[in-house]
Image (tube, rainbow, N blue to C red):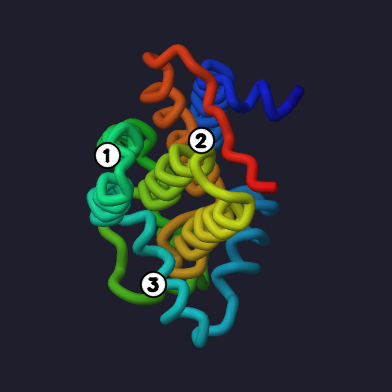
Amino acid sequence: MAVELLADPRVRLGAGAAGVLITAHAARVGTVGPGEARAFRAVNGLPDSLYPPLWLIMQFGALGAVPAVAGGAWLAGDRRLAARLLADGSATWALAKLVKRNVQRPRPAMLLAGAHGRGRPPAGLGYLSGHAGVATALGAATLPHLSPAGRAATLGIMSAVALSRIYVGAHLPLDIAGGIALGIAVDAAVALPTGQADSRRDDQ
């Protein structure tokens, strides 16, 4: 029953939109709660040796990943999926910029003492994470077309992208949660005009 509900884009759109509203409201407070601070430091304090592989995985949430993943679907012969991926990623990235300007939450270094930055210092505002949003939107569109092993790998990449943004000091956990919620909502909104629930591939 739960799987059937999640396959309905209307349910995902409502859940994603609610997630954005809830996390945006919490992020507007301008402070970092003790639980969020502990979660941030647990990930941000991981060893520096993890930076090279996590940096590579992090690129799956960059804007450049959108045409790359969409192009892969096109070359595989699935033009409908390619168009959905292109719409998902582009819309999520653009909406993330809009939400940032409205919420105005700073980056972690401005809110938490001892935040460890890695790589090039991020510009702009913290809430919400465009990388987490793009990775989630692309993954959500792709998951129904994958084998069980492919789904597991995709979910792993989506999770790693989200955690990597905390690890490099670019985002706080609420920023990540908001980005994930936005990605879910955008993919659902793009899928909604078809009027069909996603059908998952089942490999025996």
* Residue 56 circle label: 3
Quadrant assignment, res 108: bottom left
Q: Nearer the viewer, mark 3 or mark 1?
A: 1
Decide: few, some or many residues near mark 3? Use Cα within 10 Å; few <14, some 14-19, many ≥20: few
Give the Cα distance between marks 1 and 2: 18 Å
Residue lying furthest front in this view?
Answer: 204
Q: Position of residue 41 (x, y in %)?
A: 61, 67
Q: Along the horizontal axis of the image, is 135 left or right of 100?
A: right
Mark 2 and mark 3 residues within 8 Å of each other at the beta carbon: no
Q: Secondary structure at mark 2?
A: helix
Residue occupying image coordinates x 40% and y 22%: 189
From the image, tell me which residue sits under label 2.
Answer: 181
Q: Amino acid at mark 2?
A: Ala
Residue placed most toward the observer, 173 or 202: 202
Mark 1 and mark 2 residues within 8 Å of each other at the beta carbon: no
Q: Secondary structure at mark 3?
A: helix
Quadrant assignment, res 23: top right
Give the Cα distance between marks 3 and 1: 21 Å
Residue occupying image coordinates x 53% and y 62%: 160
Residue occupying image coordinates x 55% and y 25%: 12
Q: Position of residue 78 (x, y in %)?
A: 33, 40
